[in-house]
Image (spheres, grey):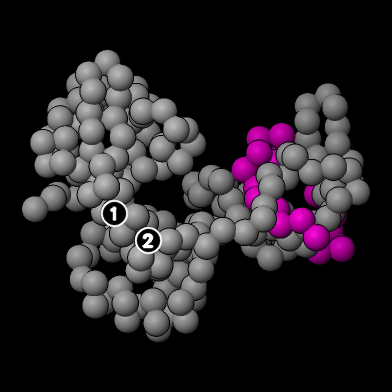
Amino acid sequence: MISHAEENYLKAVYKLSEKTEDMISTKSISLEMKTSAASVTDMLKRLSEKQYLYYEKYKGVRLSEKGQKLATSLIRRHRLWEVFLLEKLHFAWDEVHEIAEELEHIHSDKLIQRLDAFLGYPKYDPHGGPIPDEEGKFSFRKQILLCDMEIGSQGVLVGVQEDSKPFLQYLDRVKLRLGAKVELKDLFDYDGSINLLVNETDEVVVSSKVSQNLFIKPS
């Protein structure tokens, strides 16, 4: 039996491992989970004993095959619930994450299979994150960060790297929602901010930080 807290740690390790091929440090997990290094070490040892991950003192951890499978399942459940909350219950995209954090811990393969079918087997969640299928396979598409686009290039906003409530609310205010057509009109060398044309009608200037958190599918 695995607890909700243990599942959250596995998901955190998975998230961090997407960014590097190296072992994940205790410090990185501590920052991700917003808890002390001592608490992280205790949890990692427990998960190692349950064979969900490999733990090496002073080096860090990596998921075992068992841990990888469970973490992927958690992500699948979480993202399907986000789609359901947005499309069927009409929650805003800045509201769904916290609720899905609770729903993802419901262990019922039959429920998730039926939820997936009910939603029409979506490939991406409301924030653009790929949803793994029953086999744990993800659908990927060609996308780049807005900050890597060149002046004059165009594309469609397909995902966000950050999904915090303040960030998503900010994007709503400047009409940068998923599916929005964007054209990079100008780049300001002084601070890296970008002048965008959104949906061929609205001009908006976004900061360098914002541009590093928006995924664009080039057109």
Q: Can residue 122 be seen here?
A: yes
| Separation of residues labelled 2 and 1 (CA atoms) | 7 Å
In the displayed structure, would residue 203 be above or below residue 178? above
Residue 159 in the image: state x and y as whole percent.
Answer: 60, 55
The type of residue carrying mark 2 is: Gly
In the picture, the quarter occupied by the C terminus is: bottom right
Q: What residue is at 85 percent from the left and 27 percent from the top?
A: 189
Disc 1 secondary structure class: helix
Find the magenta span and give its range. Answer: 197-219
In front of the other: 97 or 45? 45
Please give the name of the residue rendered at 85% of the width and 42% of the height, measured from the top-left corner: 150
Residue under label 2, please give it. 136
Q: Are marks 2 and 1 in contact (CB under 8 Å)?
A: yes
Depicted 55 relative to depicted 181: above or below: above
**Mark 1 residue type:** Lys
Q: Nearer the viewer, residue 212 or 97?
A: 212
At 79% from the left and 44% from the top, the residue drawn is 149
In terms of image quadrants, where is residue 115? Answer: bottom left
Read off the residue under disc 1. Answer: 69
Q: Is residue 133 left or right of residue 202?
A: left
* In front of the other: 94 or 41: 41
Q: Residues within 10 Å of mark 1 (few under 14, many from 20)?
A: some
